Amino acid sequence: MADSSVQAPPGRVKGSAGPPTIDRTPSRTADAAAELSTDRHDGPDYVDDWLEKNVSLSLREFVRSHCTSFARWDLLRQLHFCRGVTLESLATSIGVGEATILPELKILEAAGLVIRQNGHGSASYGLAAGSSLAENLQAAVEAYEEDLEFRFALVYIIVRASHSGAVME
């Protein structure tokens, strides 16, 4: 009988002995191509679901509105721990230039989170005390220090806001 029309499985030579080898060539299906598309929907995901189930509405809104860059989050944390800090001192403690944090300070000041006090030739910055924003910052700092999932969610929110070019104020 002549050669059969039956094909050997991928990775196995017809008539060879031994275990079959695995074909490691990725297949390109329509589904795989769709996954690689940059037009994917960035809708609800597991981080949003976790936040929804584990974090109060006011804290979620605070984080999504005011913690949209690493510089801003670092500023808020630094101001939470230190009162009456100069621009130079803030920049040094955070490890960025003054030109990077000055616009962030102005945004936080306009939002009512930061107060600027002028005196003796230089300005100092501190948190506005007693507001719901200050309470939410306190809760965010505590959750960031104590809860790995919250820390992951906060970083994810910052990266997503930075990546999408969103400016949430």
Image (spheres, helix red, strand yellow):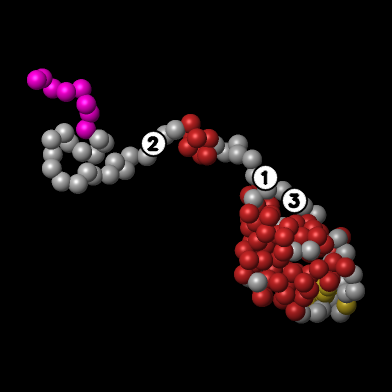
Q: Amino acid at mark 1?
A: Gly
Q: Is residue 78 visible?
A: no
Residue occupying the point 64% across, 40% down: 41
The residue that disc 2 covers is 27
Measured from the top left, where is residue 88 in percent x and y?
72, 73
Disc 2 element = loop
Q: Which residues are magenta?
A: 1-8
Label 1 CA crowd tier, 10 Å (few <14, some 14–19, many 20+): few
Image quarter for residue 152?
bottom right
Q: Residue at x 87, y 72 (%)?
A: 128
Looking at numbered disc 3 in the image, what kind of residue is underneath it? Answer: Val
Which residue appears at 13% of the width and 35% of the height? 15
Please tell me how crowded label 3 is: few (under 14), some (14-19), or many (20+) other residues with Cα within 10 Å.
few
Q: Residue at x 29, y 41 (%)?
A: 23
Q: Which mark is residue 63?
A: none
| Amino acid type, residue under disc 2 in the picture | Ser
* Res 43 label: 1
The image shows residue 44 at horizontal and vertical percentages of 68, 48
